[in-house]
Image (cartoon, grey):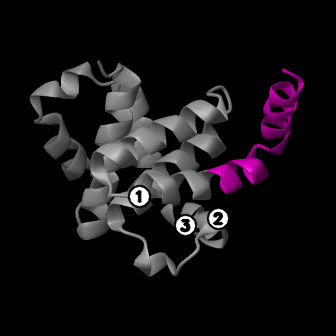
Amino acid sequence: MKTARRRAREYAVQGIYEWQLNADRPASLIEKHLRENDYFVKADEALFREILFGVLRDVTELSKRLQPYYDRDEQEVSPVERAILLMAAFELCSHPQTPYPVIINEAIEIAKTFGGTDGHKFVNGVLDKFAADVRADEVQAIRSRRQGA
């Protein structure tokens, strides 16, 4: 069973994807479209709005920060994977209260649902490196605990 937070992330990814294909479409119209889904009421609305509007507001900066971690040109990254990466990058940068492994795991699971055959592996590889930079202390602390266990 999907949690309200997972649903919020999934809807946010769908909204980011839709925006990538229709950049002239206002975010409010994208949000309205997604709310028409019967299952939207089961999503964490606050998290959905924060991610969707946050990513669309900061997309240039987030894309620039993700670029060094790609093993290919950004234009070769599928729009689905790019939407997932933008969602996760936003959360890693803006939600320090959410442990980074949770954000990465959610992104991987969403990639398995919506992405290409091995898209989740690409998402995992990019986000592992990105998290090691943007949350260096947290990553190091968790890795140290795992090695000591």
Identify the residue under disc 2.
Answer: 65
The residue under the point 46% across, 44% down is: 108
Q: Residue at label 1?
A: 119
Left or right, 115 with respect to 77, comes to left
Q: Residue at x 56, y 41 (%)?
A: 104
Quarter holding the N terminus is top left
Marks 3 & 2, CB-CB < 8 Å contact: yes
Q: Position of residue 140 (x, y in %)?
A: 85, 38
Q: Are marks 2 and 1 in contact (CB under 8 Å)?
A: no
Q: What amino acid is found at the position of numbered circle 2 in the picture?
A: Arg
Question: What is the span of residues highlighted in magenta in the rendered image?
Answer: 128-149
Question: What residue is shown at x 62% (from left), y 34% (from top)?
Answer: 101
Q: Residues within 10 Å of mark 3 (few under 14, many from 20)?
A: some
| Residue under label 3 | 63
Q: Between marks 2 and 1, how big is the CA–CA gap?
A: 20 Å
Image position of 59 (left or right of 145): left
| Kind of residue at disc 1 | Gly
